[in-house]
Every structure is written in C-alpha cells, then in structure tokens.
Image (cartoon, rainbow, N blue to C red):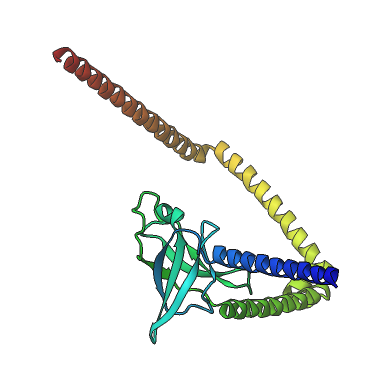
Amino acid sequence: MSIQKNNYKVRLGLFILIGVTLFLSAIFIIGKQKNMFNPVFTLTSTFYNVSGLQVGNNIRFLGINVGTVNRISIINDSSVRVEMIIKSDVKPFIKQDSKVSIGSEGIIGDKIILISQGSSNGPAITKGQELLSLEPIETDAIIASLEITAGNAEIISHELAEIMININNGQGTLGRLIQDEAIADNLSQTITNLRKSSKGLDENMEAAKSNILLRGYFNKKEKAAEKKKKDAADKIKEVAEKKIKDAEKARKAADKKKKEN
C-alpha cells in the first residue's frame, strides 16, 4: 500500500512539474513574441484602411521582426490609428522620415507592418512619434487586375491562333502573299528588276560624268565638296590654335601670379 502511494505521489509530482514547465515555456514564448521581456518604445501611424491587420501582428524593419501591433483604434469614419511596440535596440536606425505600410506574409498570409529605412543622415525617431503611412493595395484589387489581364491574354492568343490558321490556309492579304507562289514569283522578279535598274542608273551616272557637256557640272560639284572639306579643316585648325593660345596665356598669367606671391 505504501509503495503504491509513493508511486502515485511521484507520478503526480512529475505531472505537476511537466505542467508548470509547459506553462512557463508558453509564457516565455508569448512574452518574447509580445516583447514583454525586452525594453520597448511605442510608435503610432494612421491609415485609411488597415486591410485586416490585427493586434499582435509582426512589425518588420529591413526584413527583421522588430515589434508587434499593440492597439488598433478607429479615430473617425476615415482614419484608423495603429499603435506599435518596437524594440528599443532598433530605435537609432529608424528615422523620422521613415514611412509605414501594410504588407502580408505571401499573397494570403497574415498582415504585417513594414517600416521603411528613411534617409541615412536623418534624425532618429522619438518615443511616441507618429510616422507617415502609405495606404495598402488590396489583395482583392490585385487578383481582379490579374484576372482582367489573364482574360485579355486569352482573347489575344485566340485571335493570334485564328490569324495563323488564316495565313496557313492562304486566307487574307498576308496569307495570299505567303501561300500564293505567283505573288512570290512576282515579288522576286520585281526585286531583280530593281537591282538591274539600280545598276543601269550607276552606269548612266558614270557615262554622264564622261560627257563633255556635263563634265563642267560634275567638276563644279567636286570643287564645291573639296572647298567645304577645306573650310571645315581650316575651322578646326583655327579653333585648335585659339585654344593653344588661350592655354599659353593662362599659363603665363599663372606664372606671373606665382612670381608676385
């Protein structure tokens, strides 16, 4: 009887010990998440719509969880104030021009608050300061926009498929142009004729240059082109000489000033 009683006491003691351990662990984990054991300070921000943000959601700065949402209160019919608890060790890095926005853990995850970095040389925030907010983009609006884009892409792909079918069947202007061999032959012949015409034009120009009556005209053209080249070269030379003279004057002035000093 005594042995059974002792075993009962041992089991009861173990059960109580395990229960107390689990209870303390839960308090520690929850307290750590809620920053109960860390020095903290508060910040506030005002939103038009918090998009499902809840008390206890994480706050991130530079991708790191630095605090939690402490309180959400409605100010009026168009404003919601969010109070945030932030770890004190990140206070020097959050600037007064930092902005607050609402994001999410993935597309359908929990809402979180994101604090931007702000200017690197700006003043640090103070306790209880209110940061400017950026209104969140609703997930429903994004999904609706994606659905519209997908619908438009489906319509375009369907129309492209019809166009390709018509081209392969020789229908429409482009289809006849590609599929009709006679049109292709005509195009090839036209290109050949253009090449011959261009060659003939070059030959006629060479012959015209050799013609006594037109020789003066072409000589005049060549002289005008040569004169233009010469004028351009003279202009470049003049500018270069001027820059050299200016540099020489500047050097002499600097030497003179140095001697005077």
> Would you place residue 149 above or below residue 207 in this image?
below
Front-lying residue, 218 or 2: 2
Q: Residue furthest front?
A: 2
Residue 95 occupies which quadrant of the picture? bottom left
Q: Quadrant of residue 220?
A: top left
Q: Nearer the viewer, residue 218 or 129?
A: 129
For the point 63% across and 72% down, which residue is it?
Answer: 107
Residue 49: % across, % down = 46, 79
User: Closest to the observer: 95 or 21?
Assistant: 21
Asked if residue 231 shows in the view, the reply is yes
Q: Is residue 3 above or below residue 50?
A: above
In the rendering, at what x and y percent does residue 1 appear?
Answer: 85, 73
Specify the quadrant that holds the C terminus.
Answer: top left
Q: Residue furthest bottom?
A: 77
Q: Residue at x 74, y 79 (%)?
A: 158
- The answer, for residue 172, to whether it is visible in the render is no
* Residue 80 relative to residue 204: left or right: left
Callout count: 0
Q: Is residue 196 left or right of residue 236?
A: right
**Residue 248 x, y percent position in the rendering:** 26, 19
Say left or right for 163 vs 129: right
Q: Residue at x 45, y 66 (%)?
A: 85
Quadrant for residue 232, please give it.
top left
Q: Nearer the viewer, residue 239 or 234?
A: 239
Q: Residue furthest left?
A: 260
